[in-house]
Amino acid sequence: MKRQAHVYYSGRVVGVGFRMTADETSHSVGVVGWIKNLRDGRVEMVAQGDEQAVEQFLQAIRTGPMANFIKDVEIVWGPPAELFKDFEIRY
């Protein structure tokens, strides 16, 4: 079943490395969506795919090379609100 996670990361996450890591990880697990910096210092991300793939993706971000930069994570699960073809970094 296709699922969507709408995620907000806070901490020292506003940087190219965090977004690039998410982009690279999305391709390795087959997740689509987008990620972008917010003006308040958080990062917003929408990830879609099979529920197991999205969970694997989120876990990889939380435990990967950017783990020490993440202070808090807010996740809202739901059905895909919009369909994406790829994962992209938005500005």
Image (cartoon, grey):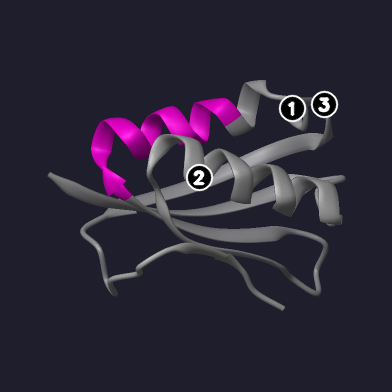
| Left or right for 4, reference 61 | left
Mark 1 lies on residue? 67
- How far apart are the alpha carbons under marks 3 and 1? 4 Å
Up/down of 40 relative to 11, above or below: below
Q: Are the residues at dot 3 and dot 1 in contact (C-beta closer than 8 Å)?
A: yes
Q: Quadrant of the N terminus?
A: top left
Counting residues from the N terminus, which is met first, the one under dot 2 or under dot 3? 2
Q: In which quarter of the image is the C terminus?
A: bottom right
Q: What residue is drawn where x is 50% and y is 35%?
A: 58
Q: Where residue 6 sits in the image (x, y, percent)?
A: 44, 57
Q: What residue is drawn where x is 82% and y is 62%?
A: 41
* Residue 68 disc label: 3
Q: Which amino acid does label 3 sit on?
A: Asn
Instruction: Determine whether the residue tagged by mark 2 lies in a helix, strand or loop.
Output: helix
- Mainly helix, strand or loop, the magenta region? helix
Up/down of 7 relative to 11, above or below: below
